[in-house]
Amino acid sequence: MRVQNHPVPSSPLSAAPPHVPLARVTRGNAVDSVHYGSVAVVDAEGRLKFAAGDPHYLTTTRSALKPLQALPLAAGGGIERFGYSLPQVALLCASHSGEPRHVEAVEDMLGRAGCTREQLQCGVHPPLYYTAHEELPPYGVKFNALHHNCSGKHTGMLAYCRMCSLPVDSYLTYEHPLQQAIRQAVSHMTGVPESQLVAGIDGCSAPNYAVPLDRLAYAYARMVTDRGDVRYASAPAKLAAAMTAHPEMVSGEKRNDLILMRAGRGDWTTKVGAEGVQAIGVRSKRWGIAVKVVDGNARGLHPATVAVLDQLGLLDEAQRTELCAWGAPAIRNYRGIVTGRIEPVLVLEEHV
């Protein structure tokens, strides 16, 4: 696998540039800790509109890349060929919770493509449902690859292989034609040449790529525009629309993407990624937003993301109320006593 060498960014633990404080954790009247990071807001022409910290910070995209990874299948007619429903299209881009509706839909998608769960190479983990609900999985229950949060993405990859008569046993290898098609999609949508994509292996074993933060934002701005893409036609907009229409399939109850897209009332398409990354496409503005918390902690990501939306004028009073538990969540100890809060502290700067 080719890996690009890039300069090491400034220490995320320091208050010095390029990163800035995004959120702070309080305890009483004192600051317990601070989460640093950067934000980029870009329009559909690739122009930087607003930023905090370093908008060009090289960022591992993680699961925020999933809509781009689904583009070859969508653009190639795979959705229509296999008869995938709109909720199933959303699952192609999902980090789902492994709820029964997710598992059943993924298994149906596999069957429609002539594949089985045994061909999924994402691995197995307990459903994210239990983490989100702070519950333990039932004793003795065995999970399989269908419960993996990335099983929808991997099903789309297998479906592409079936559609193009490609081998399925090697679909995750860097040289596989599927992965080549995905790299072309990532390069096209982000505007980063393929030779400059920084490759790595994601938690689900699929190739993943790091790009500058503003380029991730640019990709999401392009996804939500109503103009057809020169290479992928309506496929980016189709995937984004499915995600917005069925956010319950993109994540699950009590989770980031579902909460935000519900609050967005059809205007936002969003995908969170591991290690503190979030990307949002805003239809009404034709903007893309990308947020990165450099210590990778999601507790700092959520308040920062809500603050960005608010500072951009995208929240009304009802939406602020709906998102208040995410915008400045209370911290409670094991007796339920409020000991502090996680508060956003970032300030966006406009770029002209």
Image (cartoon, helix red, strand yellow):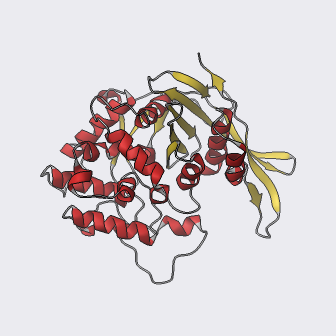
Quarter of the view holding residue 144: bottom left
Which residue is rendered at x = 35% and y = 60% of the image? 151
Q: Is residue 240 above or below residue 83?
A: above
Determine if residue 297 is in view: no
Left or right of 316? Residue 12 is: left
Point out the residue furthest to the bottom here: 140
Which one is nearer the viewer's eye here, 82 or 42?
82
Q: Is residue 278 above or below residue 213?
A: below
Quarter of the view holding residue 210: top left
Point out the residue furthest to the top here: 352
Q: Is residue 194 above or below residue 26?
A: above
Q: Position of residue 189 (x, y in %)?
A: 36, 32
Which residue is rendered at x = 36% and y = 27% of the image? 192
Q: Position of residue 239 (x, y in %)?
A: 37, 46
Which one is nearer the viewer's eye here, 168 or 321?
321
Q: Position of residue 168 (x, y in %)?
A: 18, 56
Point out the residue furthest to the left here: 165
Q: Is residue 165 above or below residue 105?
A: above
Left or right of 117? Residue 99 is: right
Total labels drawn: 0
Determine if residue 155 is in view: yes
Which residue is rendered at x = 14% and y = 51% of the image? 166
Report the quarter where the N terminus lies. Answer: top left
Report the quarter where the C terminus lies. Answer: top right
Left or right of 95? Residue 260 is: right
Quarter of the view holding residue 334: bottom right
